[in-house]
């Protein structure tokens, strides 16, 4: 398909609430200019449908061909400080999907911009930061202690309601298990878990804890 045609078609259809992104994924993999357009629309378009659909395609590219998005990592990093929480969430997700052992020095530079989202004003962004940080810990094991300590500190020191705190705790243990991260060697995590076990927490949280230790 003509590169200009696929871009024009996407821009026309992307303003709709519903869009079948599957037909665009292959094009985003094989077509450099279309892929660049998607990144630009995700980063800069102010219409939620357009930037959401752009992200939805890019995340599938990131899952199958992460190296294709390496050249845009600096643009994703800029989004970490975007005023719109959706853009922040998308940036964290894409970074966590494309990162590998070669990126450890680069991630060290943006680490605090990323991990500071653990205290974002939106609970969903805090939840995503937990998930995507743990995915990075799985990929960059040398950062596991540092990442988990940051997460634990955010869960210890916050103004969360009980409902929100329980929600974030469940997400933490869920993704520890999903990414098969051994927290038995992380002293801050064990201390935190011991404190939780001493307090009155729900049966669900106790079960989640038991599943990872």
Image (cartoon, rainbow, N blue to C red):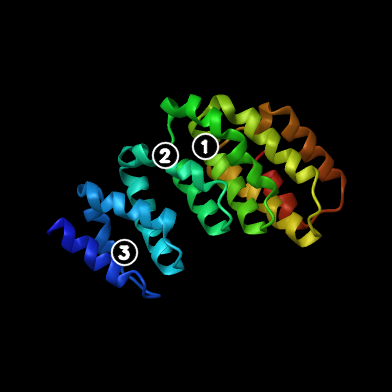
The quarter in which the N terminus is drawn is bottom left
Coordinates of residue 161 in the picture (x, y in percent): 80, 59
Q: Secondary structure at mark 2?
A: helix
- Residue ID at (55%, 34%): 110
- Residue ID at (70%, 33%): 149
In this view, which residue lies farthest toward the right? 199
Give left or right: position of 95 versus 2: right
- For mark 3, what is the residue? 21
Could you give the CA–CA distance between mark 1 and mark 3, rounded to whole angstroms? 26 Å
Closer to the chain start, of discs 3 and 2, is: 3
Coordinates of residue 25 in the picture (x, y in percent): 27, 56
- For mark 1, what is the residue? 136
Query: Depth-wise, is mark 3 or mark 2 nearer the camera?
Result: 2
Residue density around tag 2, few if under 14, some if 14–19, many if 20 or more, within 10 Å: some
- For mark 2, what is the residue? 73
- Residue ID at (75%, 45%): 155
Closer to the chain start, of discs 1 and 3, is: 3
Give left or right: position of 132 versus 52: right
């Amino acid at each position: 398909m003509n590169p200009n045609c696929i871009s024009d078609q996407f821009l026309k259809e992307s303003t709709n609430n519903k869009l079948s992104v599957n037909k665009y994924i292959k094009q985003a993999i094989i077509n450099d200019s279309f892929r660049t357009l998607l990144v630009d629309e995700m980063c800069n378009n102010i219409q939620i449908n357009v930037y959401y659909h752009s992200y939805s395609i890019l995340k599938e590219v990131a899952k199958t061909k992460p190296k294709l998005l390496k050249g845009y990592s600096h643009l994703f990093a800029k989004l970490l400080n975007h005023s719109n929480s959706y853009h922040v969430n998308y940036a964290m997700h894409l970074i966590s999907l494309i990162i590998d052992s070669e990126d450890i020095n680069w991630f060290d530079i943006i680490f605090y911009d990323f991990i500071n989202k653990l205290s974002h004003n939106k609970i969903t962004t805090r939840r995503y930061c937990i998930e995507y940080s743990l995915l990075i810990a799985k990929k960059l094991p040398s950062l596991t202690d540092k990442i988990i300590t940051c997460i634990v500190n955010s869960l210890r020191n916050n103004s969360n309601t009980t409902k929100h705190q329980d929600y974030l705790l469940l997400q933490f243990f869920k993704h520890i298990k999903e990414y098969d991260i051994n927290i038995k060697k992380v002293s801050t995590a064990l201390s935190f878990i011991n404190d939780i076990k001493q307090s009155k927490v729900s049966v669900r949280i106790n079960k989640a804890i038991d599943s990872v230790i």
